[in-house]
Amino acid sequence: MEFEEYVSARGQELVRLGFTVSGDYQRAEDLAQIALMQAFRAWRKVRTADDPHNYVRRILINAYLSMTRRRSFTEAPTAELDAERTVPDPATDIVNSDDLWRSLARLSARERVVLVLRYYQDLDDHTIADLLGIKPSSVRATASRALATLRRTRQSHRVDERLS
């Protein structure tokens, strides 16, 4: 597969992954661009990898995790998305839920990435572990902690609604 074919086939999927982990469309485009730029530079190596798409996904995820480590990084989920700029996808309605974004914003970057890869990208623990460079047991532990945080957030939200 040539690089141009890969971009045509998977470019929008990379933008969606970037959007799902970051919550910001412009940042998602930047992440996809960074991933594709780095993949292009190493395309001979990427093309011969066991799974070229996983290789490029890992580049994107590493770029996102690096971005979150910078001091200048601040996440501010938006209440509304510009309708012209959204990526058409049936899962977008679920992902755009304000409650979901607020809950996901409380998670660490790694916890958010693990949940996105597991439930949005539908990847197994071994694939996620390979993408993140960690052990499958760490993926399960991270997912468990993240889901527990989301449950606590949801319960406190329900209590707040009752008190209002």
Image: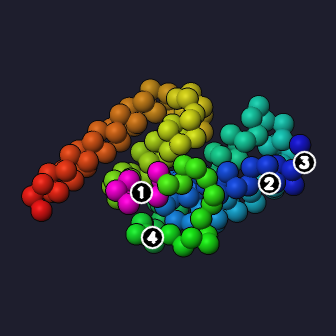
- Quarter holding residue 71: bottom left
Sequence order check: which comes first, mark 2 or mark 3? 3
**Labels 2 and 4 touching (C-beta < 8 A):** no
Quadrant into which the C terminus falls: bottom left
Which residue is identified by label 1?
97
Q: Nearer the viewer, residue 9 or 80?
A: 80
Which type of secondary structure does the marked residue at label 2 adopt? helix
**Labels 4 and 1 touching (C-beta < 8 A):** no
Real-space Cα separation, disc 2 to disc 4, in angstroms: 28 Å
User: What amino acid is at disc 2?
Assistant: Val
The residue lying at 77 percent from left, 31 percent from top is: 50
**Labels 4 and 3 touching (C-beta < 8 A):** no
Indicate the position of residue 91 as horizontal and vertical percent values: 54, 49
Real-space Cα separation, disc 2 to disc 1, in angstroms: 29 Å
Which residue is identified by label 4?
80
Q: How is the image coloured?
A: rainbow
The residue lying at 29 percent from left, 39 percent from top is: 148
Which type of secondary structure does the marked residue at label 3 adopt? loop
Sequence order check: which comes first, mark 3 or mark 1? 3
Indicate the position of residue 99 as horizontal and vertical percent values: 34, 56
- Quarter holding residue 18: bottom right
Which residue is identified by label 2?
7
Which type of secondary structure does the marked residue at label 1 adopt? loop
Q: Nearer the viewer, residue 61 or 78?
A: 78
Real-space Cα separation, disc 4 to disc 3, in angstroms: 37 Å
Which residue is identified by label 3?
2
Real-space Cα separation, disc 4 to disc 1, in angstroms: 10 Å
